[in-house]
């Protein structure tokens, strides 16, 4: 259940609970012991007062000899034996009348009330009382040790059951904690039984305590996310592999045609096609790698807000030779002043793909406009062309991987997927819509990235 | 033999057209499903090589439409997907054969020959009529065991006639099966080829059915 690095929650709970309870218990026992001690002291003092006063009354009544023996017996059988002395003061002379057997006289003064002195080498407590005429004086004494013993016995009688109960309580806590933690075991077993290849969420219908249910929900949410990401990756790998089959087939067929060609001209043609095929596969592989690189795990820290104008100018400058070659006009309208939170490299990739798409699909001689505009809620970056456009019912599929438009092109169908992915990861939105108006009244294609304005410096 | 190739990928389509032409087929190449449907509704082909992922109308839909109108033209499907269910779906919809990309040109040519042979009810690879034997795979013709040199067009014409031995083939059918749209056809080209074949194989084998067409029959 526990390993070297971790610790057992159960053991820790048992220790903490038992320790805390034991500490509180001991403290209360200590207080009780003090109280008991005090009570016992008070009780014994009362007893001494009573014995002393009774004795004085008897002595004063003149029946000393008759009662002394009885009193002595009585005092001896007290839980704490009481010794006594009786003095008579007559005509200014003190005379001891009676003394308990075994005692040679208490070395006490004549002050009435309680006092403590050493007697026979031990500590004693005395109580002295005299009659109104100061004729008779009675002193009763008790061994301090005996008194202590009694008080301690009373205290211990309270402490002992507590000491015995502690291990029993620890055992009970162990059992109760184990029972309370059983759902954790159950969840642990369920998680342990999960198949990494086919993750399925845990059964949420089984009741769990409120403390553990959120853990299961969080775990299930994670499982769903991981499963989705996993499926997505698996689908992507399969799609990518299939996408490679067609260019591979083309390469093989063209190579075979070149090998068998009867004329130099047809061989030349086939070999040129082989070269074109290699170029196209290179582009596909590059796009696949780009898509793989656009990974949140590689983004690092939260991107700092930046002004996209510079990146836009850079990307368009880079692609303008291609536009010129195809007789297309590529214009940029990007006023500085927008602040958006996006990783610079990603923005570059997204924009390059959008412009590249326009160059590929808008056709020779088309007009392409890249525009950065401020909106109340942020900034929009749009790439619009006056090419053939895309029917609105097809637009929703375009950003899926490997989907190309209806127009013939050498594209591999990943450009918009890459842009859409970057948009998602940058909390932006990619919108596909109508582009620039054409001479025939129709519209070209436009891809617009909606960024929300970056809030102050992050 | 005239083949309709429907493949949207420019490089692959171009290569297949060149390669199948090298193997002796007359190839017409179209690049989307709707064009394929339009061509198939007006003309006849010995076989169709059909890619599945086509713009405008996908390959399976074209196949379904073709079988739906009772057209039994052999169809060979090209696909990039190797999942079994897609294979099964294609075959269930009436495809005759299935090739996974990337493939070998020879394999495509051989599969097409087998498809055409079976479509004409000739399970054996060599067509014979009397002393004449025609091997479509090797593109050779023998008469009583002796090899006879034929031009590609003569071979294709003889192939057609032997496939349909005992049946009359009209001029229009023969021309449709022999020539692609890009071939410039002289009005008397067919007669010239027939004349040459008769000279090489003997006069009796190919009969002229006046006002209708030609027929191959055992002497």
Image (cartoon, coloured by chain):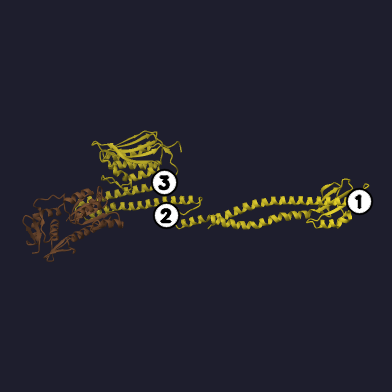
Chain colours: A yellow, B brown
Q: Residue furthest left?
A: B210
Residue B63's x, y, as percent? 23, 53
- Res A100 quadrant in image: bottom right
Q: Which residue corresponds to mark 2?
A: A200
Q: As displayed, is residue B32 above or below residue B207?
A: above
Q: Which residue corresponds to mark 1?
A: A95
Q: Identify which residue, A122 or A227, lies in the foreground.
A: A122
- Where disc 1 sits, the SS reads strand
Q: Nearer the viewer, mark 3 or mark 1?
A: 1
Does any portion of residue A175 appear in the rendered image? yes
Whether residue B79 sits left or right of residue A374 in the image: it is: left
Q: Dot 1 falls on which chain?
A: A
Q: CA distance from mark 1 to mark 2?
A: 103 Å
- Choose the circle earlier in sequence order: 1 or 2: 1
Q: Which residue corresponds to mark 3?
A: A296
Q: Are marks 2 and 3 in contact (CB under 8 Å)?
A: no
Q: Dot 2 falls on which chain?
A: A
Query: 10 Å neighbourhood of mark 3: few (<14), some, or many (≥20)?
Result: few
**Quadrant of the drawing holding the N terminus of chain B:** bottom left
Residue A246's x, y, as percent? 28, 52
**Quadrant of the drawing holding the C terminus of chain B:** bottom left
């Amino acid at each position: 259940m526990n390993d070297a690095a971790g610790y057992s929650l159960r053991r820790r709970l048992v220790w903490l609970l038992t320790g805390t309870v034991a500490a509180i218990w001991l403290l209360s026992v200590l207080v009780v012991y003090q109280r008991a001690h005090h009570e016992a002291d008070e009780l014994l003092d009362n007893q001494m007062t009573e014995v002393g006063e009774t004795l004085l009354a008897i002595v004063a009544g003149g029946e000393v000899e008759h009662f002394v023996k009885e009193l002595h017996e009585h005092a001896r059988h007290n839980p704490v034996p009481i010794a006594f002395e009786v003095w008579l003061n007559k005509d200014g002379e003190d005379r001891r009348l009676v003394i308990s057997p075994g005692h040679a006289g208490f070395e006490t003064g004549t002050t009435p009330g309680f006092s403590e002195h050493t007697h026979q080498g031990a500590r004693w407590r005395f109580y002295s009382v005299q009659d109104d005429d100061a004729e008779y004086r009675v002193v009763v004494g008790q061994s301090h040790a005996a008194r202590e013993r009694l008080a301690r016995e009373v205290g211990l009688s309270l402490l002992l059951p507590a000491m015995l109960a502690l291990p029993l309580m620890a055992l009970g806590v162990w059992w109760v904690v184990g029972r309370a933690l059983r759902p954790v075991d159950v969840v642990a077993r369920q998680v342990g039984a999960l198949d990494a290849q086919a993750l399925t969420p845990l059964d949420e219908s089984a009741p769990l305590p409120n403390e553990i249910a959120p853990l299961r929900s969080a775990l299930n949410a994670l499982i769903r996310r991981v499963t989705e990401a996993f499926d997505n990756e698996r689908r992507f790998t399969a799609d990518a592999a299939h996408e490679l089959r067609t260019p591979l087939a083309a390469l093989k067929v063209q190579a075979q045609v070149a090998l068998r060609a009867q004329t130099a001209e047809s061989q030349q043609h086939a070999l040129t096609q082989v070269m074109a095929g290699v170029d196209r596969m290179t582009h596909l592989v590059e796009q696949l790698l780009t898509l793989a690189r656009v990974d949140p795990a590689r983004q690092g820290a939260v991107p700092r807000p930046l002004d996209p104008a510079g990146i836009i100018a850079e990307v368009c400058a880079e692609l303008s030779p291609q536009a010129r070659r195809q007789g297309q006009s590529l214009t940029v309208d990007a006023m500085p002043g927008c602040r958006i939170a996006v990783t610079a490299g990603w923005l570059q990739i997204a924009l390059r793909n959008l412009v590249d798409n326009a160059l590929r699909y808008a056709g020779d001689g088309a007009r392409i406009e890249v525009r950065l505009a401020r909106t109340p809620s942020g900034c929009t970056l749009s790439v619009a062309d006056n090419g053939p456009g895309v029917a609105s019912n097809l637009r929703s599929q375009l950003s899926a991987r490997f989907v190309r438009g209806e127009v013939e092109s050498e594209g591999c169908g990943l450009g918009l997927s890459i842009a859409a992915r970057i948009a998602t990861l940058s909390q932006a939105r990619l919108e596909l819509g109508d582009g620039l108006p054409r001479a025939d009244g129709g519209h070209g294609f436009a891809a617009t990235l909606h960024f929300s304005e970056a809030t102050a410096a992050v | 033999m005239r083949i309709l190739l429907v493949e949207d990928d420019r490089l692959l389509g171009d290569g297949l057209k060149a390669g199948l032409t090298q193997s002796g087929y007359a190839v017409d190449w179209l690049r989307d499903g709707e064009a394929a449907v339009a061509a198939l509704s007006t003309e006849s082909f010995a076989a169709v090589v059909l890619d599945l992922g086509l713009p405008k109308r996908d390959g399976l839909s074209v196949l379904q439409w073709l079988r739906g109108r009772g057209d039994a033209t052999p169809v060979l499907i090209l696909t990039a997907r190797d999942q079994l269910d897609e294979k099964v779906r294609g075959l269930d919809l009436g495809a005759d054969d299935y090739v996974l990309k990337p493939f070998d040109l020879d394999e495509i040519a051989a599969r097409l020959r087998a498809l055409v042979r079976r479509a004409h009810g000739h399970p054996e690879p060599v067509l014979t009529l009397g002393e004449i034997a025609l091997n479509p795979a090797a593109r050779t013709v023998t008469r009583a065991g002796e090899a006879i040199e034929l031009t590609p067009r003569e071979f294709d014409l003889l192939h057609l006639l032997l496939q349909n031995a005992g049946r009359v083939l009209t001029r229009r059918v023969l021309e449709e099966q022999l020539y692609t749209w890009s071939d410039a056809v002289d009005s008397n080209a067919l007669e010239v080829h027939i004349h040459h074949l008769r000279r090489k194989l003997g006069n009796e084998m190919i009969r002229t059915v006046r006002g209708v067409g030609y027929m191959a029959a055992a002497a």
